[in-house]
Image: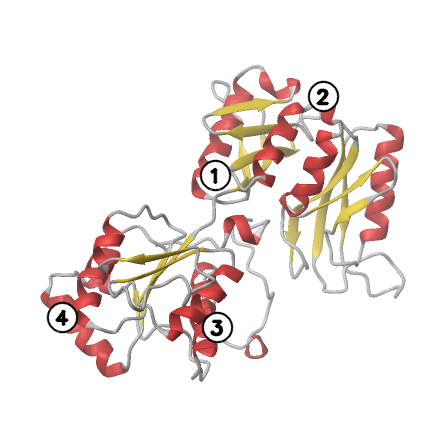
Amino acid sequence: MLNIADTLHRWCREKRPFALATVVNVTGSAPLPVGTSLAVDEDGNAVGSISGGCVEGTVYELCQEVLLDQSPPRRAWFGYSDDDAFAVGLTCGGELDVLVQRINPATRPHLGAALAEIAGGRPAAVAQVVDGPDRLIGATLSVLGDSWIADATMAAGPTGQAVADRAAAQLRAGRTVLVSLGGDAGTCPDRLSVLVHVAATRPCMLIFGAVDFAAALSQAGRFLGYRVTVCDARPVFATAARFPHADEVVVDWPHRYLERTEVDGRTAVCVLTHDSKFDIPLLQLALDLPVGYVGAMGSRRTHDERLRLLREAGVAPDRLARLRSPIGLDLGARTPEETAISITAEIIAHANQGTGRSLTLGTGPIHRLGDQAVDERRAPQGPLLTP
């Protein structure tokens, strides 16, 4: 849904009914993740994609049928077929489970409010029931700040509160995810599968060291959707003119800046100074914080000396194990731009538990499904990182 949030926001503002087709389950190497949507309005205008082109025509027709008939939500399954070259299916060999439903913005004002927040770059979550009792399939609930609003079918009773609690938790975590809940008479009597669409604030990339490599990395980080800060204690180097792609350039000692900065499990800390008077107090603090990634630049000799100083400073072995040093994947990078790709590649691999090996050398599915946690819009969410 969030891949087309801007258009859906406009349609809701205009109270224009539309059909929404959403990927609710994925098996194998499907082209797009859970939560991705395609929508069609009553004039036949379409926006979005759920398969990269493989099954769009059929899904478009389903959307038109649901709009015309005003029928209940329906599920459609698409898999791979090698029996007929012209059959509807996924050429990648994966499988998609799609929910198609009619949305009338006039009866779901909370959805328009959530989409307005998302379109404005503010955090919000929309929970969508994709499996459960017929009366609840397709029902939606929006979490805005500390409050929530739901469709009438879900607002009353404990079910709405249970869904809202889970959606709020996912909003805090910054994750779009398919969850199962219910079966408890006291909290949520109905067994449900709920797709929680989350638009969180951008994750932070904190780059310490106002060097040429930082300039390239700030550009790569911004491209990936991070809010990028470059920090250095030297005012002659830490200037906005040198780092036009950074959201913020700070003149301060790195560890002092980090002490007063809010971080979370999606924060990436990249230390490019390779100067022990800056590195050691900074890394000593960073390795003790709940950030997702900590990497430090330097040669093997610099790395060994850095580890020695950190041990002398009392950093525990389990904390030292979190340090990615020398920073980046072995891509043979030499230029600042190549090094930025090396660093961001390692961050992506770490976030998604990837190996960093060439796909040519592997077997099995390309995409890791995990618990169906996905990022629907790269820019506002960024990659999910775990400490």
Q: Nearer the viewer, mark 1 or mark 4?
A: 4
Under circle 1, the secondary element is helix
Q: Is 300 located above or below residue 103 in the figure?
A: below
Q: Is residue 172 left or right of residue 131?
A: left
Who's the residue at 14% across and 73% down the image? 308
Which one is in front, 325 or 58?
Answer: 325
Q: Quadrant of the N terminus?
A: top right
Under circle 2, the secondary element is helix
What mark, if any, has residue 309 been given in the picture?
Answer: 4
Residue 85 seen in the figure: yes
Q: Is 318 located above or below residue 117 in the figure?
A: below
Identify residue for label 1.
Answer: 170
Q: Earlier in the sequence, mark 1 or mark 2?
A: 2
Q: Is residue 190 left or right of residue 255?
A: right
Q: Amino acid at mark 1?
A: Gln
- Image coordinates of residue 164 in percent, x first then y, are 51, 27
